[in-house]
Amino acid sequence: MFTGPLSKMKVELHDEVQYTLRLSSDLCVNDFIGTVISLNWNGKITCTACGKNTKKSFGDGFCYTCFVSAPEATECTIRPELCRAHLGEGRDPVWENTHHNVPHFVYLAASDTVKVGVTRAGQIPTRWIDQGAKAGIRLAETPNRYEAGRLEVALKAFFTDKTNWQRMLKNELDSSIDLVEEKWNLHDQLPSDLTEFFTEDDEVIEINYPVLSYPEKVKSLSFDKTPNIEGKLVGVKGQYLIFENGDVLNLRKHTGYVVTFEV
């Protein structure tokens, strides 16, 4: 029995993704695939920023006060084109300078369609894994988050920046996607002030997930409605646990929820 506040699972890419659930001890989730597990929420939620109890979780596990004040919850985490770190501004300029005024990658990721996104250098392939992508490629490297966001906005005219979580969990893939071709087609369609950031790195990273079987239909579970969740774990993809009956649990959505894990 292991207890603690939920957080985003740690991931490592090997032949297939290795998932670690961090509670009172680190648990290799892959080891429990094919096993009946239970996750029981005790009704308590702790803020990931300040550690205080909160009745409701905002964003990635913040209490409301931290959600509107913590640099980790600033709007440019979702909309990087709004970032002001390169100007020495932001909720916490020191934090912003360390986390946002640093090199970022703009990338393309493949699943049922092509998705565009932004992440800090060093977060590849973690970012792609968290989104449940089948493959990803670096498109551009920028000196800061703002420039990456500016390029991402331009790319939204061609691709989505959203993940269809239901299709992702049903493993609906478009096998015809050629990320290298998609990347360099864009180079010919964008203005030079954006293409100057394009990288020559055309490595396509393929990602395999530890899943025994994918559901035909998915039903999202929530601790707010079902405090005690139990079932046979048949896989993990993105930040979701997949159960035998098609139920799925987004652990990241429940960041800060204090749960007990049992087998």
Image: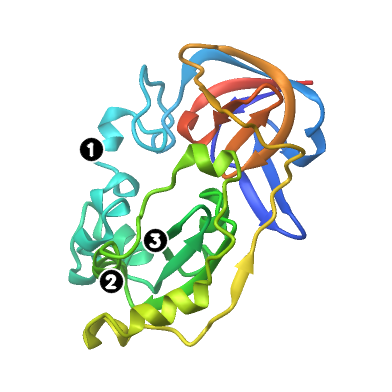
Mark drawn on residue 55: none
**Residue 46, visible in the rendered structure:** yes
Classify mark 1: helix, strand or loop. loop
Residue tagged 2? 151
Kindly identify the amino acid type of the residue bearing the numbered disc 2: Leu
Mark 2 neighbour class, 10 Å CA radius: few under 14, some 14 to 19, many 20 or more: many
Look at the image and tell me in which quarter the C terminus lies: top right
Residue located 79% across and 33% down the image: 32
Mark drawn on residue 117: 3
Instruction: Give the image quarter of residue 37.
Output: top right
In this view, the mark in front (2 or 1): 2
Residue located 24% across and 49% down the image: 75
Which badge, 2 or 3, comes first in the chain's sequence?
Answer: 3
Residue tagged 1? 68
Marks 3 and 1, how far apart at CA: 24 Å
The reply to whether the C-beta atoms of the residues labelled 2 and 1 are less than 8 Å apart is no
Left or right relative to 119: residue 110: right
Marks 2 and 1, how far apart at CA: 26 Å
In this view, the mark in front (3 or 1): 3
Mark 3 neighbour class, 10 Å CA radius: few under 14, some 14 to 19, many 20 or more: many
- Residue 104 position within the rendered picture, expressed as x and y whole percent measured from the top left: 39, 70
Mark 1 neighbour class, 10 Å CA radius: few under 14, some 14 to 19, many 20 or more: some
Left or right relative to 89: residue 101: right
Classify mark 3: helix, strand or loop. strand
Instruction: Give the image quarter of residue 210.
Output: top right
